[in-house]
């Protein structure tokens, strides 16, 4: 899920795949680190991007791109420091000039408020409660696969990777299955936007209206569940309590919104990335088919090798030295998950996709530190179960690399907008 990837980043700052190219906004204009000429970043589809990241880790581990204004942190150790030191690198982005909202969400909080809200949420979002959803996730995945199994070729994103997480989240929250189309429409409008559309006048207002539709819908459902006794996640959130302390209505609505918006999008990216990487590494796919016990470990490698969220964005609360440079107060500081997850100082042979690698708890696939995604267990579970169902139902899963394949381009995401795949039933 996406809480660790900072949904607080507003439209206008975008990354294409692992290419960090946000639009300059907020404070700090005019600050520069050095006049050294940095080679331009390759495109996300160019394998040279990873050589570029290696060069930045070795020569410019913390660098302020004058075209963006962000201080990008490329090494694993430095990125981990940024993500685990909220007193110096804050998640409260309103200090950068971002508009404050009456509906402040968990990813935009620092301790101690963040600690309080997360502790209450954890009483409703326990590992045992997530694991109990496995039969429903398997059933929903089979139902969706039933609809596409005979087609021969499908768009794995639109036909499976979008629809399964949305169906799962609606069922977990206890929302009507018939509302799947409504949530699917909201998701596609957010995820299909291009950088050009983001730059158009009125885009932020239109996005705000779209988000308000979802928030109004969720608020109504939260009010219906207050002081009720049923076994869905939204009811548990609406009535979650820790030592007599309960979430406010706004906090409950916000977390449900983050769970939908961040959770399903990052899971969508992870499922499609897993299918693509296993197609690129057929030996790994065959081994997983023979030994399903390796699937959880393979999911971790997918998250390391191609994290669904590109960066963790923070704001410096004071002047600080990092990576040999001085970052002034009130600056955007972006921990590059894509680069840190390939740092040879942390991961041996980092460019290799190795399903035997043990990296859980170390990579930044679902963020790290204070804002490590609270729903990471659900995202991992969904991806693992979807892969199992696909292996059960299809003896061949092959990406059509000459087809209508397209990378996702909206803010902060790594993955596909379209992934044409040939499916041969078992």
Image (spheres, grey):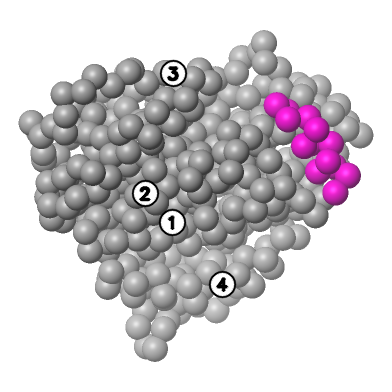
Mark 2 against mark 4, which lies toward the viewer? 2
Write down the region rendered in magenta: 279-291
Residue at the image point whose x is 67% and y is 48% from the top: 357
Mark 1 against mark 2, which lies toward the viewer? 2
For label 3, count other residues whose C-alpha is less than 10 Å away and answer few (under 14), some (14-19) or many (20+): few
Question: How far apart are the alpha carbons under marks 1 and 3?
Answer: 26 Å
On the rendered structure, is 352 left or right of 426? left
Q: Which element carries disc 4, helix, strand or loop?
A: loop
Earlier sequence position, callout 1 versus callout 2: 2
Residue at the image point whose x is 28% and y is 21% from the top: 38
Q: Is residue 342 visible?
A: yes
Marks 2/4 in contact by CB < 8 Å: the verdict is: no
Query: Viewer-proximal residue, 333 or 233?
Result: 333
Earlier sequence position, callout 2 versus callout 4: 2
From the top left corner, tell me how far across and down residue 129 is, in percent: 62, 70
Mark 4 against mark 3, which lies toward the viewer? 3
From the top left corner, tell me how far across and down residue 174 is, in percent: 57, 61
Marks 1/2 in contact by CB < 8 Å: the verdict is: yes
Q: Which element carries disc 2, helix, strand or loop?
A: helix
From the top left corner, tell me how far across and down residue 246 is, in percent: 36, 79
Mark 3 against mark 2, which lies toward the viewer? 2
Residue 126 - label: 4
When asked about the image quadrant of residue 64, the answer is top left
Earlier sequence position, callout 1 versus callout 4: 4
Marks 1/3 in contact by CB < 8 Å: the verdict is: no
Earlier sequence position, callout 3 versus callout 2: 3
Residue named by callout 1: 368
Earlier sequence position, callout 4 versus callout 3: 3
Residue named by callout 3: 43
Question: How far apart are the alpha carbons under marks 3 and 2?
Answer: 23 Å
Residue named by callout 2: 79
On the rendered structure, is 92 left or right of 157? left
């Amino acid at each position: 899920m996406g809480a660790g990837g900072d949904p607080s980043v507003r439209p206008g700052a975008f990354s294409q795949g692992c290419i960090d190219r946000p639009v300059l906004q907020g404070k700090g204009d005019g600050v520069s680190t050095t006049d050294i000429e940095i080679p331009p970043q390759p495109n996300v589809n160019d394998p040279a991007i990873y050589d570029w990241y290696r060069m930045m880790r070795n020569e410019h581990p913390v660098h302020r791109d004058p075209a963006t204004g962000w201080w990008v942190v490329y090494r694993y150790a430095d990125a981990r420091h940024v993500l685990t030191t909220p007193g110096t690198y804050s998640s409260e982005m309103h200090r950068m000039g971002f508009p404050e909202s009456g509906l402040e969400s968990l990813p935009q909080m620092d301790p101690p408020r963040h600690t309080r809200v997360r502790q209450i949420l954890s009483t409703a979002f326990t590992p045992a409660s997530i694991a109990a959803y496995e039969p429903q996730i398997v059933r929903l995945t089979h139902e969706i696969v039933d609809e596409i199994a005979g087609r021969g070729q499908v768009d794995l994103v639109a036909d499976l990777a979008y629809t399964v997480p949305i169906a799962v989240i609606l069922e977990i929250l206890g929302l009507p299955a018939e509302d799947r189309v409504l949530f699917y429409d909201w998701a596609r409008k957010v995820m299909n936007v291009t950088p050009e559309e983001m730059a158009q006048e009125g885009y932020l207002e239109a996005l705000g209206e779209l988000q308000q539709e979802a928030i109004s819908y969720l608020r109504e459902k939260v009010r219906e569940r207050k002081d009720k006794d049923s076994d869905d996640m939204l009811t548990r959130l609406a009535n979650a309590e820790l030592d007599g302390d309960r979430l406010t209505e706004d906090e409950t609505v916000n977390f449900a919104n983050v769970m939908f918006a961040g959770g399903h999008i990052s899971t969508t990216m992870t499922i499609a990335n897993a299918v693509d990487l296993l197609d690129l590494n057929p030996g790994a796919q065959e081994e997983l088919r023979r030994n399903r016990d390796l699937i959880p470990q393979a999911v971790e490698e997918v998250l390391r090798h191609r994290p669904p969220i590109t960066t963790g964005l923070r704001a410096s609360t004071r002047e600080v030295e990092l990576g040999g440079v001085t970052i002034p107060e009130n600056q955007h500081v972006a921990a590059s998950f894509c680069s840190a997850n390939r740092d040879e100082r942390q991961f041996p042979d980092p460019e290799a996709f190795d399903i035997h690698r043990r990296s859980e708890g170390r990579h930044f696939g679902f963020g790290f530190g204070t804002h490590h995604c609270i729903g990471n267990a659900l995202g991992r579970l969904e991806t693992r179960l979807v892969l199992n169902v696909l292996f059960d139902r299809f003896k061949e899963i092959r990406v059509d690399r000459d087809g209508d394949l397209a990378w996702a381009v909206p803010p902060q995401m790594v993955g596909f907008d379209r992934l044409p795949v040939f499916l041969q039933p078992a």
